[in-house]
């Protein structure tokens, strides 16, 4: 047992920390994401950190999951604007699947480009009638000569509206699309994965924006969209296994990020309650407030341990289903618990947006509160995750023949 | 980072589990609730033969030189088995202080006997106000020539009724503070002026009232430095707290396993109740509370084993484990339904002990306040 980091890992953490403290973040392009600064993203990519966990032969740094988590933790506590949504699908999901199942050509093309910050990958899985029950998806791809023809609809496609904006930064937006390639085989033996450039809408593709209080996502329609046959990842009809083995459903796509984010905010809240006078004494003297903050610290520490245990398990090649699903579940619930507790601590001031001169913590908690409720149920939320844990960790019977 | 136990720790766990499954069936646990002593001397002799009582003592005192992680592994298994034993009070509450601050003469005198399982010790710390802070200490030790004269009441002292020696935390100055005025004294329980009563508790776990009336203790029985005992008590409490957390996660693990087994077998509405999502949800809740407590406990225990500062981690572990064990056993009961409340069912044994453990060495509120202080509040 050992709960410390190696000297090299400590140095790596220090390097990221001082980078975040030194480098200006630059302007945020909110059209892409509320946490995306192209300038900052490029600088992080130039350090090699976007692809830090990819093997060196594909342009990465060959570091492990622990280092990836350290990166997320430090970036999170400094709120480094690298567009975490994009990072998760590009690096943690897309990168990992390509590394394991991509053709040599795909690996040589994508992994160095991701590392350099030139290519983004979006996740094209969900459909209107295939959410938690992803195997019910209907989008269909059929081979025709050197192409596949795609027909169908994909829901909550956050990547799609971004292409037009990131193009101006010489970045391209690709999508990892999950589609059916066999209409007669069982659902889990009939899916294939495709990866292709969708920076500019392909002929036959149309995007219908969906506005949420936090970000813009979209519904994407495919009407006889032609993509090159080389877009196929791995073999036809085997993609369900690739998705399952990637742990896409139960691991956190932003390893370490939320630990850092919440640890940083907790410190700010501690400072806030010390400086805020209520009924003639600092709020920090109030036992209820003290205990709320202490409980947050306890749960964040729990998340930290879950996260590093997961990274350690993955680096060692151990089964990650248990550590991954429990970690994801804990993360999702803590995001809600944290933002709600923080709101309660701030009282009426919690509702103020950053534009208000009265807003404490620069309005961060108000925006977190909106954002985190959504984050908490994206890609297998707590309810579906209970099914996963019950089935896969506790071995309880699953009458839906579920799932991942 | 390394979340794994060593090979020898895995062997220790396996040995302990096999031994306790064989030697400590729940019939014995129930029997000991009603027993005057509250533990089985025959079983403890066998435990001593396995070198458990000397687990954390160095070899030159008859021990095997294990560390705090080894101790956690063993306590987890004891908690799983609900072992009724003086092991915790003797080895953790009595043995550790002698090992860590005792004089060479005291170590020679006590540690080999502890390792052989020949004597029982315990710590007389809490008093009728039932707090774990220095202000709560009212028992006084006043100098009279080459003796101390002790007066006052200690409460919730585990296994005092069978202890050969008590380590008593007493005021040796009129005004005591954390820095000064508290001393530790090793008291032979055969000394005149000591009366002891076993309290009737929810877990029937032999906590006692100990009354000192002009009890005279030789000066050489001072453990550690005169007037500077409290600083060590705070260290000892950290270890005792995490040791208790280890027992708690062992018990909670067993409750989860019992419950999951039960819901796979119990059929209602023509199918195992474990196929119902609400039942699954309860089981998942139990698992995640357990995992939280486990990771926090291991981290605190590892830091203790390395001698690193860990006041926050210790309190985080106990705050979480206190609530977790209680909720886990309550959910286990809910899922088991009526059958779990039958006295011959094991569920209620765990449920009652979870409450006892929750409030020992500070409950969740007590430890949240400590975490708050560590946060700088």
Image (cartoon, helix red, strand yellow):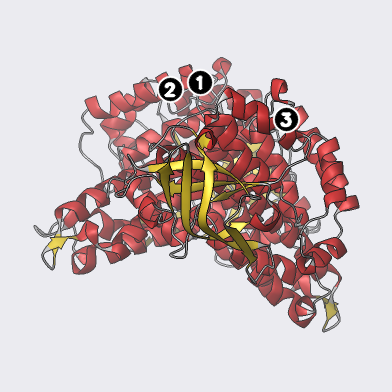
Q: Label 3: which residue?
A: B112
Q: Is residue A337 left or right of residue A404?
A: left
> Mark 2 or mark 3, which is nearer to you?
3
Residue B139 horizontal/vertical position (percent): 44, 55
Residue drawn at the location 58% of the way across and 34% of the way down: B98
Q: Residues within 10 Å of mark 1 (few under 14, many from 20)?
A: few
Residue at 35% across, 54% down = B135
Q: Are marks 1 and 3 in contact (CB under 8 Å)?
A: no
Q: Position of residue A97 (x, y in %)?
A: 62, 36
The residue sitting at 29% across, 66% down in the picture is A344
Q: Is residue A294 left or right of residue A310?
A: left
The chain letter under disc 1 is: A
Q: Give the left or right position of residue B183, taking residue B192 as reference.
A: left
Query: Residue A291 or A189: which is nearer the viewer?
Result: A291
Secondary structure of the residue carrying numbered label 1: loop
Q: Quadrant of the N terminus of chain B?
A: top right
* Image: B11 above or below A275: above
- Chain containing the residue with disc 2: A
**On residue A10, which mark appears?**
2
Alpha carbon of mark 2 to alpha carbon of mark 3: how far? 43 Å
Depth order, front residue of A17/B346: B346
Callout 2–callout 1 Cβ contact below 8 Å: yes
In the drawing, what numbered circle is on residue A245?
A: none
Question: Within the image, what quadrant is residue B31 found in?
Answer: bottom right
Give the percent coordinates (x, y) of residue B267.
Answer: 85, 78
Q: Are marks 2 and 3 on the same chain?
A: no
Q: Which mark is residue A6?
A: 1
Is residue B223 rendered to the left or right of residue B72?
A: left
């Amino acid at each position: 047992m050992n709960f410390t980091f190696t000297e090299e890992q400590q140095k790596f953490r220090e390097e990221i920390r001082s980078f975040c403290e030194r480098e200006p973040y630059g302007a945020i392009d909110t059209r892409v994401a509320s946490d995306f600064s192209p300038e900052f993203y490029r600088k992080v990519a130039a350090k090699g950190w976007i692809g830090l966990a990819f093997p060196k032969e594909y342009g990465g740094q060959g570091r492990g999951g622990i280092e990836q988590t350290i990166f997320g933790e430090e970036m999170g506590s400094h709120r480094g604007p690298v567009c975490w949504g994009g990072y998760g699908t590009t690096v943690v999901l897309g990168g990992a699947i390509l590394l394991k199942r991509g053709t040599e050509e795909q690996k040589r093309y994508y992994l160095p480009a991701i590392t350099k910050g030139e290519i983004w990958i979006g996740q094209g899985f969900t459909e209107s009638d295939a959410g938690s029950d992803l195997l019910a998806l209907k989008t269909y791809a059929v081979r025709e000569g050197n192409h596949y023809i795609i027909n169908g609809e994909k829901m909550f496609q956050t990547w799609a509206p971004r292409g037009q904006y990131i193009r101006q930064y010489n970045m391209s937006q690709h999508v990892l699309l999950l589609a059916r390639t066999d209409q007669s085989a069982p659902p889990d033996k009939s899916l294939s994965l495709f990866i292709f450039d969708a920076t500019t809408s392909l002929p036959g593709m149309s995007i219908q924006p969906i506005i949420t209080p936090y970000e813009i996502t979209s519904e994407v329609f495919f009407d006889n969209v032609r993509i090159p046959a080389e877009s196929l990842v791995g073999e036809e009809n085997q993609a369900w296994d690739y998705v399952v083995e990637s742990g896409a459903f139960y691991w956190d796509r932003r390893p370490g990020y939320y630990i850092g984010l919440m640890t940083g905010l907790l410190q700010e809240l501690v400072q806030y309650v010390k400086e805020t006078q209520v009924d003639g004494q600092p709020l920090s003297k109030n036992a209820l407030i003290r205990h709320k903050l202490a409980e947050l610290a306890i749960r964040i520490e729990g998340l930290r341990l879950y996260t590093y245990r997961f990274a350690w398990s993955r680096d060692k090649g151990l089964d990650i289903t248990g550590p991954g699903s429990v970690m994801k579940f804990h993360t999702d619930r803590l995001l809600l618990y944290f933002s709600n507790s923080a709101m309660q601590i701030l009282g009426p001031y919690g509702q103020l947006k950053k534009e208000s001169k009265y807003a404490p913590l620069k309005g961060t908690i108000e925006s977190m509160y909106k954002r985190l409720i959504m984050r908490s149920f994206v890609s297998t939320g707590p309810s579906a995750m209970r099914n996963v844990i019950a089935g896969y960790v506790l071995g309880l019977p699953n009458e839906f023949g579920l799932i991942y | 980072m390394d979340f794994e136990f060593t090979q020898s720790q895995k062997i220790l766990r396996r040995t302990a589990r096999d031994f306790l499954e064989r030697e400590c069936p729940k019939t014995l646990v129930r029997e000991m609730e009603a027993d005057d002593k509250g533990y089985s001397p025959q079983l403890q002799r066998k435990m001593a033969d396995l070198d458990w009582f000397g687990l954390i003592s160095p070899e030159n005192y008859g021990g095997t030189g294990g560390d705090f992680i080894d101790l956690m592994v063993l306590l987890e298994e004891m908690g799983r088995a609900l072992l009724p034993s003086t092991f915790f009070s003797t080895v953790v509450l009595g043995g550790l202080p002698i090992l860590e601050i005792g004089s060479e003469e005291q170590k020679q005198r006590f540690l080999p006997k502890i390792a052989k399982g020949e004597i029982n010790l315990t710590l007389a710390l809490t008093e009728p106000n039932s707090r774990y802070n220095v202000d709560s200490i009212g028992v006084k030790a006043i100098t009279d020539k080459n003796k101390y004269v002790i007066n006052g009441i200690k409460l919730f002292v585990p296994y005092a009724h069978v202890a050969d020696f008590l380590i008593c935390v007493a005021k040796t100055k009129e005004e005591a503070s954390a820095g000064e005025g508290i001393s530790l004294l090793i008291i032979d329980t055969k000394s005149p002026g000591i009366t002891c009563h076993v309290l009737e508790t929810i877990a029937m776990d032999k906590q006692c009232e100990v009354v000192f009336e002009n009890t005279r203790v030789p000066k050489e029985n001072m453990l550690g430095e005169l007037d500077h005992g409290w600083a060590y008590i705070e260290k000892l409490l950290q270890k005792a707290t995490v040791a208790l957390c280890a027992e708690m996660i062992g018990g909670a693990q067993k409750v989860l396993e019992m419950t999951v087994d039960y819901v796979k077998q119990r059929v209602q509405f023509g199918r195992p109740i474990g196929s119902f999502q609400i039942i699954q949800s309860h089981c998942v809740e139990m698992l995640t509370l357990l995992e939280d407590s486990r990771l926090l406990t291991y981290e605190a225990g590892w830091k203790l084993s390395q001698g690193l500062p860990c006041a926050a981690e210790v309190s985080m572990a106990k705050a979480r484990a206190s609530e977790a064990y209680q909720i886990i056993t309550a959910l286990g009961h809910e899922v088991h339904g009526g059958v779990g409340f039958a006295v011959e069912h094991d569920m209620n044994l765990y449920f009652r002990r979870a409450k006892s453990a929750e409030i020992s060495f500070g409950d969740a509120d007590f430890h949240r306040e400590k975490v708050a202080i560590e946060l700088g509040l």
